[in-house]
Amino acid sequence: MISFRSLAMSIFFAGVLSMGFISPAVTSTASHSLTTDIPTMSSPGSTYTWIWEEFEDAPGPIYGDDSVVWGASLGPYYNYGELTLKLTALQNNFSQYIDLFSIGKSRDGRELWTLCLTNKSVTSEKTEFHLVAHHHAREVITIVNAMYFVDKLIYEATQANSTFTNFLTNCEIYVTPCLNPSGCISSNVFI
């Protein structure tokens, strides 16, 4: 049985990751372990904020140079540090559904974080899917799209929505929300 990590590396080096979504990849019963240490939240036991709650106070359109308004934080979009904290919060609050691990490092040494979403209590063979976002530096909205997908899936599962719980029971969904963390950093500088 081929593992996700070996499949991901094969695809990565073949240059096919730019396709974004692989449907379905392989089946697996593999468990995932961290390849690097995950940073911890500054306040243990903090509540998780869903992405739609984060955007409640976002302003309307900004005309002109939005970097003047937002600066390094990228405003309602995630910079690399904010994304890392969001992923860590997901892992800490929903460990029954989420494994967070790195599939490697960027050219500048930043982790390529990947989430595995599944119902961990079910250990039977599952179909795997992989969603990859933020391939190019100025595509920061794709990080938000990927994180909305993750939040919606986990939120609905915690609300016992049978469609979503069945999906997590029968599938492993891998999400790499930022394939280009160095580009995420540089977009703060060159916007």
Image (cartoon, rainbow, N blue to C red):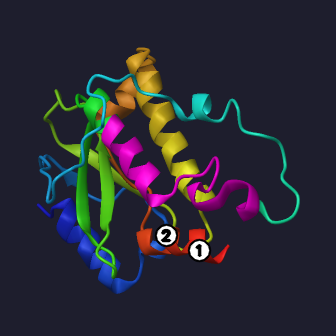
Residue 70, magenta (yes or no): yes
Q: What stretch is highlighted in magenta?
A: 67-89
Looking at the rendered structure, the kind of residue marked 1 is Val
Looking at the rendered structure, the kind of residue marked 2 is Ile
Considering the whole magenta stretch, tell me its main secondary structure: helix
Identify the secondary structure beneath mark 2: helix
Q: Position of residue 37 (x, y in %)?
A: 16, 53
Q: Position of residue 145 (x, y in %)?
A: 58, 49
How dense is the environment of label 2, judged by Cα within 10 Å: few (below 14), some, or many (20 and up)?
some
In-front residue for pair 75/146: 75
| Image quarter of the C terminus | bottom right
Q: Where is residue 168 in the image (x, y as percent from the top left)?
A: 33, 33
Residue 1, magenta (yes or no): no
| Image quarter of the N terminus | bottom left
Q: What separation in Å lies between label 1 and label 2 (alpha carbons)? A: 7 Å
Looking at the image, do the residues carrying marks 1 and 2 touch, with CB atoms under 8 Å apart? yes
Identify the secondary structure beneath mark 1: helix
Q: Quadrant of residue 110?
A: bottom left
- Vertical order, 6 against 115 (above or below): below
In-front residue for pair 24/49: 49
Residue at label 2?
185
Residue at label 1?
189
- Identify the residue at horizontal 24%, vertical 41% (top origin): 40
- Identify the residue at horizontal 13%, vertical 46% (top origin): 29
How dense is the environment of label 1, judged by Cα within 10 Å: few (below 14), some, or many (20 and up)?
few
Residue 99 as seen in the image, left or right of residue 166: left
- Identify the residue at horizontal 83%, vertical 42% (top origin): 60
Residue 67 as seen in the image, left or right of residue 52: right
